[in-house]
């Protein structure tokens, strides 16, 4: 079982942003690889702390983690921070320690800063999905314009950082002498500068290329969710970095008949006076096709029929929601003389007078049942 993020950092669930950052800073210093050379256990704890901070420092990810736990970041195309590599981790330290990246510790035998691979910029797209797409899961093929290395571009070692991609400085802090590093201002952290570039390349040796990207979208996603396709963003300048990511925002399209509420769906079914009195059967739309349901004779307006498992699958694998069919008895807006005479004769008939019993639930009881 995966360890709780709050336990990893040693903070309570109600910890403030500053307390979370302070706890992570402490763990990062304690388990930093330069302070613990060759210690696989320390490196693993260092990675776990970074993953915990990556989630708990982001308000949206933290809210999702607080509600769903680790399952909020599993099987959903990259909703969270799992699987961080050392490049991702060291990129966090500009925020934690101020200035640029975080290198070794003076006096800890770190041997200077750790070289950081340059990462290309992320791309963001929006994908529109129908309720049917969301209910069944879908694979979308999207054309994406991304920057790639232009063929024919050549590089040479940067004269400022000598290929390290970083410049370092040592400062005295309350924790002792600390060595910090930041991206080289000349090459932007690539460690290389352009020696030759073709005419269709930009100043970084990149050019725009259109590519078809296949995106597997799991069943149960919600409007506003964001998926990550690793390595399908812009490539990094210099030819030796890693490509950015493609961030896919989900937009849920309105359905003509169904309304979504979490994993449940709602359907308004209208029947006539005669159908309500005599009973009938009706064909209705669901996300898996049409189904026919039976309406018992004497059905009351406001009756809710629950079709179990006909809703949306849970993104966390907890089964499917239900389809709630709301029965509405349609009252004619106009009557001809024959119809009016009939209803006037029936107005004093005992069968037409309201006479609810214990089986006829109130509106509030029906709403309560919907959420039970």
Image: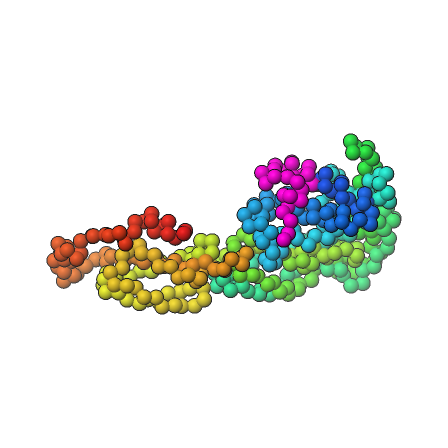
Any magenta on residue 155?
no
Say if 278 sits above or below 344 in the image: below
On screen, residue 68 versus residue 207, left or right, reads: left
Residue 357's x, y, as percent? 24, 52
Q: Is residue 249 visible?
A: yes
Say if 188 sits above or below 16 in the image: below
**Residue that appears at 74% across and 42% down:** 28
Say if 170 sits above or below 358 in the image: above
Looking at the picture, tell me which residue is in the foreground, 334 or 245: 245
Give residue 214's quadrant in the image.
bottom right
What range is drawn magenta here?
1-24
Total labels: the figure holds: 0
Any magenta on residue 12?
yes
**Residue that appears at 62% across and 56% down:** 78
**Residue that appears at 64% across and 43% down:** 7
Residue 22's x, y, as percent? 68, 37
On screen, residue 142 versus residue 280, left or right, reads: right
Residue 63's x, y, as percent? 56, 45
Residue 84's x, y, as percent? 70, 52
On screen, residue 118 versus residue 313, left or right, reads: right
Say if 84 sits above or below 100 in the image: below
Residue sitting farthest toward the front? 1
On screen, residue 109 versus residue 209, left or right, reads: right
């Amino acid at each position: 079982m995966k360890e709780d993020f709050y336990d990893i950092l040693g903070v309570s669930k109600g910890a403030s942003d500053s307390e979370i950052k302070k706890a992570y800073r402490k763990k990062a210093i304690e388990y930093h690889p330069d302070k613990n050379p060759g210690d696989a256990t320390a490196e693993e704890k260092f990675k776990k702390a970074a993953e915990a901070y990556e989630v708990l420092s982001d308000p949206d990810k933290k809210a999702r983690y607080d509600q769903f736990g680790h399952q909020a970041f599993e099987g959903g195309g990259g909703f969270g921070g799992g699987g961080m590599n050392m490049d991702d981790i060291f990129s966090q330290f500009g925020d934690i320690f101020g200035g640029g990246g975080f290198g070794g510790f003076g006096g800890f035998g770190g041997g200077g800063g750790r070289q950081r691979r340059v990462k290309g910029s992320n791309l963001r797209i929006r994908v529109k999905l129908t309720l049917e797409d969301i209910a069944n899961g879908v694979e979308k093929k999207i054309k994406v314009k991304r920057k790639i290395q232009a063929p024919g571009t050549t590089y040479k070692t940067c004269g400022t950082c000598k290929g390290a991609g970083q410049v370092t400085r040592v400062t005295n802090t309350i924790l002792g002498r600390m060595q910090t590093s930041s991206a080289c201002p000349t090459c932007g952290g690539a460690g290389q500068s352009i020696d030759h570039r073709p005419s269709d390349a930009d100043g970084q040796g990149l050019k725009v290329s259109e590519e078809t990207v296949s995106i597997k979208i799991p069943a149960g996603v919600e409007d506003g969710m964001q998926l990550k396709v690793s390595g399908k963003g812009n490539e990094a300048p210099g030819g030796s970095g890693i490509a950015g990511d493609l961030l896919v925002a989900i937009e849920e399209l309105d359905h003509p008949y169904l309304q979504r509420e979490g994993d449940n769906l709602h359907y308004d079914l209208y029947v006539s006076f005669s159908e309500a009195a005599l009973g009938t059967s009706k064909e209705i739309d669901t996300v898996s096709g049409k189904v026919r349901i039976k309406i018992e004779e004497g059905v009351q307006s406001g009756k809710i029929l629950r079709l179990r498992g006909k809703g949306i699958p849970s993104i966390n694998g907890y089964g499917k929601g239900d389809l709630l069919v709301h029965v509405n008895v349609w009252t004619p807006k106009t009557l001809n003389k024959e119809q009016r005479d009939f209803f006037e004769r029936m107005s004093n008939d005992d069968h037409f007078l309201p006479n609810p019993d214990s089986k006829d639930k109130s509106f509030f009881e029906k709403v309560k049942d919907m959420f039970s």
